[in-house]
Amino acid sequence: MFEEFGFETLTAAQASLYFALGLGLLFGVFSEQVKFCFRRALIGADRAQAAGVWATALLVAVLGTQYLVATEIIGFEDHRLMGDFPVVQIVLGGLAFGAGMVLTRGCVGRLTVLGATGNLRAVTALLIFAVVAHATLKGVLSPLRTAAGGIGPTLDAVSLSDSFGNILPLAIIAAITGAIIWRSGSSIPSLLGGGAIGGLVIAGWVGTGFILYDDFDPIAFESLAFTSPWTDSIFWTLASTSVSAKFGVGLVGGVIAGAFLSAAASGRLSWQSFEGPAHFGRFAAGASLMGFGGVLAGGCTIGAGLSGIPSLSIVPITALVAIGLGAVITHRLVDATPSTYGSDAQGTIPHQQPAE
């Protein structure tokens, strides 16, 4: 499809960079406005409203993506989501990511948005996350990833549409998300923002899988995600003369720009930092768990969840359930074991951190 547009100065990979930049810019704006975050939807003080927004995004993404599949515009037959399914690795990765998400008080997508608004806690966590994720993919931690993949059974990834047809899985997803939306009490503007984010997932799939598809210069078939894009971005930042910027770099850059512009226009830019060494330690541990877990689980709440579930593969569904379970368990453990973040004398009770 790409060659039909007659681009003379851009390759498909270069075009995907600019496409991702625009996609990320819009995600940054919408996400900053509605405070889009899976952690908030699970355990936030306003979790009902946040869950309604997240469910709206997922419903739109699933229905739109599956429409493209039904009309044969895109297909997931050869996608990694339909490859091998190392059950234990996916579950362990999801649990680790969920735990880290609670410790850092935000999923990676939310931290990216917060970092653009002046939150130095988020910036620090993102840098640690990206380094650990890259080390797990290609560096010193890769033997642990390989070992985790060898534990337990490795199954062929099961597509729900292959097993049950399209109607039943879509009906179940629509019923679950519809009930969450109905009970959420979210405002119409917030729900529209969530729907717009779901639309960006659809745009990502059709953009990389159809519009920019080129037989002679193939690019990755992908949509919104943050684990792989952040590892690509950190590597490109350190070695830009040796590697080219592609989709992931454009996406991360776009999200940062969009979130900054949105926060600046709304007067929400502000410097925020750590309260002390213990506070930093919590975020560092959480970011490390997310970096390691995100790679094992095949993505974050956005890549494996919001973008992955619309494929109707059992892999991203398992990953998101494990992430949610890890987050809830960790939240209860952290609440049951209060600790001080700052450098006050021992025995003081820390004040409640504001919601991220």
Image: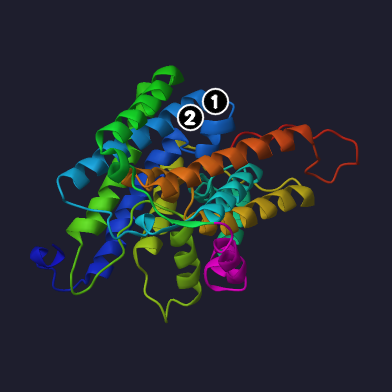
- The answer to whether residue 200 shows anywhere in this view is no
Q: Which residue is mark 1?
A: 46
Amino acid type for the residue under numbered disc 1: Asp
Q: Which residue is mark 2?
A: 50
Residue name at image x 48 percent, y 60 percent: 230
From the viewer's perspective, is residue 342 above or below residue 238? above
Relative to 1, 82 lies left or right: right
Q: Dot 2: what SS? A: helix
From this view, report whether residue 92 is shown above or below residue 174: below
- Amino acid marked by disc 2: Ala
Q: Is residue 236 left or right of residue 343?
A: left
Residue closest to the eye, 139 or 113: 139
Q: Which residues are magenta?
A: 131-152
Q: Nearer the viewer, residue 27 or 170?
A: 170
- Residue 179 within the magenta-colored segment of the rendering: no
Instruction: State yes or no: discs 2 and 1 in contact (Cβ < 8 Å).
Output: yes
User: What secondary structure characterizes most of the magenta part?
Assistant: helix
Give the quadrant of the N terminus. bottom left
